[in-house]
Amino acid sequence: MPAHNPGLVYVSATVALHLHHYSGRMWLGRRLVRLQPGDFTLTPARLKSNYDLDEAGHHLCIHFETLAARRFPLRLPLHWRPGPHAQWLGERLQEIIHLFRLGDGTSREAKLARHAAGAALQGMLLWLAVTVGPRQTAAVAAPTRVDGALDDVRRHLDEHYRRPLDVPALARQVGVSQNHLARRFRARHGMTLQRYVLGRRIELARHLLAATRLPLKAVAIEAGLGNPQYFHRQFQRATGHNPSEERRLSVARGS
């Protein structure tokens, strides 16, 4: 995406799903969205959109067609800040794109890949509807002082998630009560402060397991997950498999 180009208008005949890796402003029709790296947007078909970016960047993008819902229409967010879910979303999008590319052709394998890509996309959209749908208006509501404080808290956690979490000190830092901070943070992100920090630590651990040969104990320490037993338990709970299996899976994906 080019930087500082709000005059360029995009109109697609299909629904456009983006995971952005840049900051700036985006207009969905007349609705202004302030983008940060990791943000998710969904642009309905034939809705005009345009951008004003701080600098050129890239995004993951999938375009798809929809059918009219007969019984259970989905409520999906036009803009969502996924936080600790960003890596998971990125991996799902990469998988869908990979399957779609494998579906180029008329062979039986290509047809199966196209079906697999469609099924994976539907599964991700259903997950979004369940996870984000009821809270989708929160991301575009008019900002308040507490919203600014929550943004500061999230930025602090994103930068310092490996450090021990001190909720009382964090609340004092942004000028709100501890209970109010915990309540509003959970309302916005759908999880506690502790769960958000744990998600970021698991993200880092997954990256270290895939990109380095560090021993599991060193990965646990680098990710802020303490002793190996706690690391193993929390990683298993978050991903469905243990750290050793994650490393084997990452090697298999890269081979």
Image (cartoon, rainbow, N blue to C red):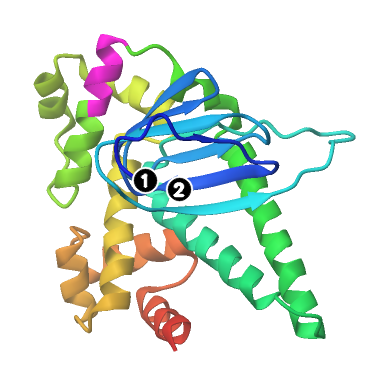
Residue that badge 2 annotates: 19
The quadrant holding residue 247 is bottom left
Left or right: where 249 falls relative to 152: right
Q: Position of residue 48 (x, y in %)?
A: 57, 29
Residue farthest bottom in this picture: 255
Given residues 190 and 14, the one toward you in this image is 14
Given residues 84 and 163, the one toward you in this image is 84
Please check the rendered image and state whether residue 105 is part of the magenta-colored stretch, yes or no. no
Q: Position of residue 54 (x, y in %)?
A: 25, 37
Q: Position of residue 181 (x, y in %)?
A: 27, 21
Residue sitting at 36 percent across and 60 percent down? 234
Kind of residue at disc 1: Gly
Residue 69 visible? The answer is yes
Whole-number angstrom distance, CA of label 1 to CA of label 2: 6 Å
Residue farthest front in this picture: 7
Determine whether the residue tagged by mark 1 lies in a helix, strand or loop.
loop
Q: Position of residue 49 (x, y in %)?
A: 52, 31
Is the C-beta separation of discs 1 and 2 under 8 Å?
A: yes
Up-down: is 83 above or below 204? above
Q: Quadrant of the C terminus?
A: bottom left
Kind of residue at disc 2: Leu
Q: Determine crowd level at label 2: few under 14, some 14-19, many 20+ residues with C-alpha closer than 10 A.
A: many
The residue range painted magenta reads 144-151
Residue sitting at 60 percent across and 31 percent down? 133
Numbered badge on residue 124: none
